[in-house]
Image (cartoon, rainbow, N blue to C red):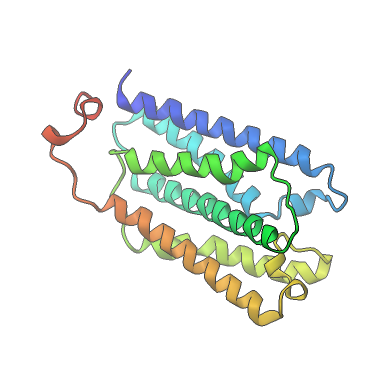
């Protein structure tokens, strides 16, 4: 088995794990009294999770057929990796904050897989993959489009349906609109920072062939 085949199989496994996590998370939320299908699919985590499954399946197929990844695919990989990492960071902050106010948030296995395990595996895949295309810094502008659109949509939809996917988007659950805006700016900054880090990794100087690890040199 060569390196590209190994990456293809790993990404298929990552996609399968993402699909299992999404199904499990859906089944878990069925037991919540406020459950609604439209609300479930309004979570940033769910939307980015679905997108990551599609992108990683595509990346697996490309890895099985090509020696290197095209730039457009790696741009999509960088985007979904950024989004699921941000979802994990934000969810971790929410869980941590709840413990500070004596309020416990249940974290089922599907949520752990979706918010923590899969994002970490996706990050490892990105870091160790030597076949990535060199991404332009212009990519950062595209990486922020979907999150900003999602934030605007959610803030408009929230008052209409009386529901927000995350507490900090509801001005009634924080100190007011100012704090909500602050949270949104922080999220945008985190997204931009992670996307910049992933882009920067692709622009590092390539290692000479004789310094590559054995599994790469033999590919």
Total labels drawn: 0
Q: Residue furthest top?
A: 1
- Image location (x, y in percent) of residue 83: 52, 53
Residue 14 appears at what percent x and percent y?
51, 33
Q: In the displayed structure, would residue 190 be above or below residue 59?
A: below
Q: Residue at x 59, y 46 (%)?
A: 115
Left or right of 147? Residue 123 is: left
Residue at horizontal 54 percent and vertical 34 percent from the top: 15
Q: Is residue 79 visible?
A: yes
Q: Which residue is situated farthest in the right direction here?
A: 33
Q: Position of residue 161 (x, y in %)?
A: 83, 65
Question: Could you say which quadrant of the image residue 66 lies in?
Answer: top left
What quarter of the picture does the N terminus occupy? top left
Residue at the image point whose x is 54% and y is 49% from the top: 84
Q: Relative to 68, does residue 71 appear above or below in the rendering? A: below
Q: Residue at x 51, y 28 (%)?
A: 13
Task: Give residue 116's position: percent from left, percent from top.
Answer: 55, 44
């Amino acid at each position: 088995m060569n390196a590209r085949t190994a990456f293809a199989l790993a990404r298929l496994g990552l996609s399968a794990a993402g699909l299992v996590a999404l199904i499990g998370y859906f089944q878990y939320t069925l037991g919540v009294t406020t459950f609604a299908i439209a609300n479930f699919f309004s979570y940033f985590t769910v939307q980015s999770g679905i997108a990551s499954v599609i992108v990683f399946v595509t990346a697996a197929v490309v890895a099985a057929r090509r020696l290197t990844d095209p730039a457009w695919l790696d741009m999509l990989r960088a985007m979904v990796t950024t989004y699921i990492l941000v979802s994990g960071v934000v969810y971790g902050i929410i869980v941590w904050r709840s413990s500070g106010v004596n309020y416990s948030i249940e974290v089922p296995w599907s949520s752990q897989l979706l918010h923590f395990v899969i994002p970490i595996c996706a990050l490892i895949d990105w870091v160790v993959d030597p076949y990535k295309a060199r991404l332009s810094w212009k990519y950062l502008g595209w990486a922020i489009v979907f999150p900003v659109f999602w934030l605007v949509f959610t803030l408009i939809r929230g008052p209409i349906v009386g529901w927000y996917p995350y507490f900090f988007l509801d001005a009634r659950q924080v100190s007011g609109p100012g704090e909500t805006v602050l949270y949104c700016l922080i999220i945008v900054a985190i997204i931009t920072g992670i996307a910049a880090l992933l882009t920067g990794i692709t622009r590092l100087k390539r290692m000479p062939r004789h310094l590559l690890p054995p599994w790469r040199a033999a590919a």
